[in-house]
Image (cartoon, helix red, strand yellow):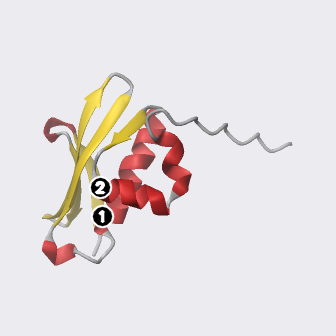
Amino acid sequence: MDLVITDVADATRYEARDGTALAGFVQYQLADGLVVVTHTEVDPAYEGRGVGGALARHVLDDIRRRDVSALVVCPFVTSWIGRHPEYADLLYGAKRQAAPPAPEA
């Protein structure tokens, strides 16, 4: 399996594709400075193969890159963050972690 995850903005979702097959997606909504993560779905043929986790990680990494917060109402992504607390600072209302200091030259 060679997953490619892309933000399909017109559909307001991130899609995970294995070749041309849609393996899963995460639906979202946008607000000013906020991404509302609403739903995750994985095709039954891809369940148990890490598609949901790959989607969650990609979505949250993209939210971090955009320097916005996430309001997660999707139970899957909420549970995933519970197992990956390094993403908890992205949640709406959470205190952002300070960037680590730059290494000395």
Q: Position of residue 31 (x, y in %)?
A: 29, 26
The number of callouts visible is 2
Q: Position of residue 78 (x, y in %)?
A: 37, 54
Task: Identify the residue shown where x is 76% and y is 40%.
Answer: 102
Work out how far the residue at label 2 is from the one at label 1, CA to CA, in angstroms: 12 Å
Q: Which mark is residue 75?
A: 2
Left or right relative to 10: residue 37? right
- Going from the N terminus, do you reach mark 2 or mark 1 first? 1
- The amino acid type of the residue labelled 2 equals Pro
Task: Identify the residue shown where x is 48% and y is 41%.
Answer: 90
Question: Within the image, what quadrant is residue 97 found in?
Answer: top right
View extreme (top): residue: 32
Left or right relative to 41: residue 30? right
Along the viewing direction, whichever of 39 and 101 lies nearer the viewer? 39
Along the viewing direction, whichever of 93 and 25 lies nearer the viewer? 93
Along the viewing direction, whichever of 17 and 75 lies nearer the viewer? 75
Q: Local crowd at mark 1 within 10 Å, few (<14), some, or many (≥20)? A: many
Left or right relative to 85: residue 45? left
Marks 2, 1: nearer the viewer: 2
Q: Which mark is residue 105?
A: none
| Quadrant, the C terminus | top right
Q: Position of residue 80 (x, y in %)?
A: 40, 60
- In this view, 25 is above or below 96: below
Q: Circle 2 — which element?
A: helix
| Quadrant, the N terminus | bottom left
Q: Circle 1 — which element?
A: helix
Question: Within the image, what quadrant is residue 47 found in?
Answer: bottom left
Q: Which mark is residue 52?
A: 1
